[in-house]
Image: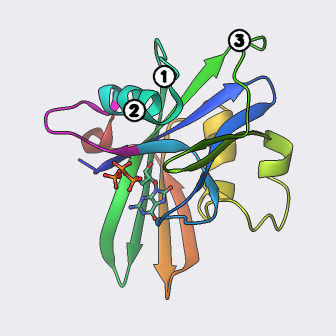
Amino acid sequence: MYPYTICFIKRGHNLLLLNREKAPTKGLWNGVGGKFEPGESPLACVLRETFEETGIKLADAHYRGVVSWESDGISRGGMYVFVAELPEDYVYPTPLKISEGILDWKAIDWILSERNLGIGEMIPYYLPAILRGECLEHRCTFSNHKLTGYTAVSLSVEVLGS
Ligand SMILES: Nc1nc2c([nH]c(=O)n2[C@H]2C[C@H](O)[C@@H](COP(=O)(O)OP(=O)(O)OP(=O)(O)O)O2)c(=O)[nH]1
């Protein structure tokens, strides 16, 4: 079991991202999410965290696998990844300042554009597969706080999140 969830809320060609006030991914745009409360399933956690951070009460979110990270050969953490789709006419005015940072709609093309240093460092690796609907385990390796390795593998039973 990994300790975190993350959600990418999609509306048309945009994702609702959070420019984070604090670590991890401090100062960068990332999905919304957070840590599990005792006894929560990944889906319950991501629906609660999404509501707490955005005020959006999602009816459902689609499980898209796991992102995990390690350094010095030791597993340091991981998160269950979800995508939720809102209707194109869903009204959610941004930018919106919240205690965790600033929420805003960011175009998927902008998020995934080359050399975009403003987004969470693992996002360029795992987000394309997630948006294609693939459900994988994305493994990232860090050395001196820099991402130095990435592989995507089939999900093993233990890390199934829904
Ligand atoms: N710990 C950690 N989380 C990460 C990394 N990269 C990344 O996208 N995340 C995600 C997982 C979560 O969605 C989010 C971190 O959650 P958080 O610390 O804000 O959790 P929380 O809201 O429950 O925290 P808090 O209010 O209790 O401090 O960032 C990373 O390298 N380390």
Spot occupied by residue 57 in the image (x, y as percentages of width and height): 47, 17
The residue pinned by badge 2 equals: 46
- Secondary element type, mark 3: loop
Q: Earlier in the sequence, mark 1 or mark 2?
A: 2
Which span is picked out in magenta? Answer: 34-42
Q: In this orientation, which residue lies closer to the viewer: 78 or 134? A: 78
Is there CB contact under 8 Å for labels 1 and 2? Answer: yes
Q: Earlier in the sequence, mark 1 or mark 3?
A: 1
Give the class, few, some or many, for how many residues have Cα within 10 Å of label 2's Cα (few <14, many ≥20). Answer: many
Taking the spot 73% from the left edge, 40% from the top edge, the residue there is 95
Q: Estimate the spatial distance between the alpha carbons at disc 2 and disc 3, rounded to whole Å.
A: 19 Å
User: Mark on residue 61?
Assistant: 1
Is there CB contact under 8 Å for labels 2 and 3? Answer: no
Taking the spot 26% from the left edge, 42% from the top edge, the residue there is 36
Q: Estimate the spatial distance between the alpha carbons at disc 1 and disc 3, rounded to whole Å.
A: 14 Å
- Amino acid carrying label 3: it is Pro
Give the class, few, some or many, for how many residues have Cα within 10 Å of label 3's Cα (few <14, many ≥20). Answer: few
Q: Is residue 125 left or right of residue 58?
A: right
